[in-house]
Image: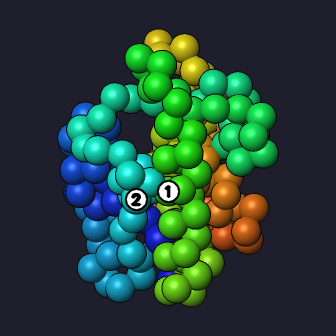
């Protein structure tokens, strides 16, 4: 069993109130292979919401208290991101998920690259907070773009 970023299967959970739907991901849910989840909503953030980026290194450093997550207008939402990560692990544990397919580049869900903290669209290597948290608890995390490249 897997969990999957909710925006990938059509839920309008993104910061801009839109989604990142792809039929390949929807099919995983339809076939009972994956359960959708949005850590930013579960962490108590509204939709739509101000975009956020990790300031500092990446998700692992946020978990260790060495980096923060700020909105574009400077509000500290680190605790919301940590709460969302904990809730994601709770769901993974509940359904016995050993894998998570997570949306590329997101400060929560990114597995390979995330935005670099300057809010200019530039990327850096690193993981989002939920991706890092799940990985540190033994869940295999798969970047959504990589999944599409491999299976489409
Ligand atoms: S937090 Fe993850 S699931 Fe939620 S909208 Fe962002 S990328 Fe999608």
Among the 4 quarters of the image, the one containing residue 15: top left
Can you identify the residue that label 2 sits on? Answer: 42
Q: Residue at x 52, y 30 (%)?
A: 76
Question: As displayed, is residue 27 above or below residue 133?
Answer: below
Question: Do the CB atoms of the residues marked 2 and 1 lie less than 8 Å apart?
Answer: yes
Task: Judge from the rendering whether residue 89 lies leftward or rightward of residue 41; answer left or right.
Answer: right
Q: Position of residue 124 (x, y in %)?
A: 65, 26
Q: Position of residue 130 (x, y in %)?
A: 58, 54
Q: Is mark 1 within 8 Å of ligand 1?
A: yes
Q: Residue at x 39, y 75 (%)?
A: 35
First in residue order: circle 2 vs circle 1: 2
Among the 4 quarters of the image, the one containing residue 135: bottom right
Badge 2 density bin: few <14, some 14–19, many ≥20, Cα 10 Å: some
Question: As displayed, is residue 122 above or below residue 62?
Answer: above
Can you identify the residue that label 1 sits on? Answer: 84
Q: Image quadrant for the C terminus?
A: bottom left
Question: As displayed, is residue 117 above or below residue 18?
Answer: above
Residue 147 visible in the picture:
no
**SS for tag 1?**
helix
Q: Residue at x 41, y 17 (%)?
A: 73
Task: Judge from the rendering whether residue 46 lies leftward or rightward of residue 126; answer left or right.
Answer: left
Q: Position of residue 113 (x, y in %)?
A: 61, 36
**Which of 5 and 133 lies nearest the eye of the viewer?**
133
How is the structure coloured here?
Answer: rainbow
Q: CA distance from mark 2 to mark 1?
A: 5 Å
**Which of 6 and 69 lies nearest the eye of the viewer?**
69
Q: Residue at x 22, y 50 (%)?
A: 12
């Amino acid at each position: 069993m897997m969990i999957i970023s909710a925006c990938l299967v059509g839920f309008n959970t993104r910061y801009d109130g839109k989604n990142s739907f792809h039929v390949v991901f929807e099919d995983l849910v339809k076939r009972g292979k994956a359960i959708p989840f949005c850590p930013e909503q579960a962490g108590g953030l509204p939709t739509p919401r101000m975009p956020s980026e990790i300031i500092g290194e990446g998700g692992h450093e946020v978990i260790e208290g060495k980096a923060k997550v700020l909105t574009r207008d400077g509000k500290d939402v680190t605790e919301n991101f940590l709460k969302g990560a904990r809730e994601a692990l709770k769901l993974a544990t509940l359904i016995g998920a050993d894998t998570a397919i997570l949306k590329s580049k997101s400060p929560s869900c990114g597995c390979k690259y995330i935005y670099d903290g300057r809010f200019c669209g530039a990327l850096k290597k690193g993981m989002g907070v939920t991706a890092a948290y799940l990985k540190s608890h033994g869940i295999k995390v798969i970047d959504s773009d990589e999944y599409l490249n491999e299976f489409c």
